Amino acid sequence: MAKLQQMTVVGYKDENFSSKVGAYTAMLNPETYSQNFDVQYNVEQGQGTPDATIKYEKSTPSTVNFDLVFDATGVVNSKRTNLQSEISKFKKVVYDYNGNIHSPNYLKLIWGKAMLYKCRLTSLKINYTLFKPDGSPLRAKLSTSFKEFQTPSAALDKNSPDMTHVKRVVSGDLLPSLVYDVYRDESQILNVAKYNQLDSILHLDPGMKLYFPPLKK
């Protein structure tokens, strides 16, 4: 019979996940967890056009949400019966301020072969559900939310001409220079002007958004 794998949260003090500062192993595994993915589009309508066009802006980091039950009755683990101590150990890894990096820790969620998720905590809610006669809590449900974190070396190259770029025009901007900044090739000027439905390639209104579509392969 395969050994039960407990979810573990490992804290690191660097964005490359090379300097471990602590870990916490869950008393009970989550019953379920959810992973959410969001894609953001711009639906602004060009002046004088009857319909809005949905244009891709970016894909945001995913989020993972789950509940952890902490049980200090001794039924789950006879050696882990101090609820506040267990919660404090968990918070030290995922939530508490790390003075070395001036923020909470970078995290890895590890659960057997099912999950290896680099992230940071974005939300933690504690709901106490069982108490001793004197009012001391014995059980709690911790609702958590984590946002995916990509190390700079692993992140997608945002300067790539294979991505759609969005730039907001400032006074003095010229279309040729903006096109060259994105593509390193001014020959895309007419394509960009057409994509943005520009009346003129010589005049840009400060504050307007320009979209630079991916180069066709």
Image: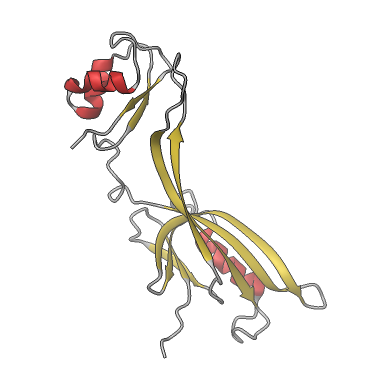
Total labels: the figure holds: 0
Q: Residue furthest front?
A: 50
Please tell me which residue is depicted at 44% across the width and 56% down the height of the picture.
Answer: 119
Q: 65 or 216, which lies in front?
A: 216
Q: Is residue 34 above or below residue 162?
A: below
Residue 152 image offset from top left, x and y in percent: 31, 47
Please tell me which residue is depicted at 69% across the width and 64% down the height of the picture.
Answer: 127
Q: 184 or 96, which lies in front?
A: 184
Q: Is residue 111 above or below residue 1?
A: above
Residue 189 horizontal side relative to residue 9, left or right: left
Q: Is residue 185 above or below residue 125?
A: above
Q: Residue furthest bottom?
A: 1
Colour scheme: secondary structure
Residue 52 image offset from top left, x and y in percent: 46, 26
Residue 108 image offset from top left, x and y in percent: 42, 63
Hey, which quadrant is residue 207 in on the image? top left
Classify the position of the C terminus by image quarter. top left
Residue 21 horizontal side relative to residue 73, left or right: left
Classify the position of the N terminus by image quarter. bottom left
Q: Residue furthest right?
A: 133
Hey, which quadrant is residue 189 in on the image? top left
Hey, which quadrant is residue 57 in on the image? top left
Residue 162 image offset from top left, x and y in percent: 24, 37
Q: Is residue 203 above or below residue 111?
A: above
Please tell me which residue is depicted at 36% across the width and 51% down the height of the picture.
Answer: 150
Residue 106 horizontal side relative to residue 138, left or right: left
Please tell me which residue is depicted at 18% across the width and 20% down the height of the picture.
Answer: 186
Q: 160 or 164, which lies in front?
A: 164
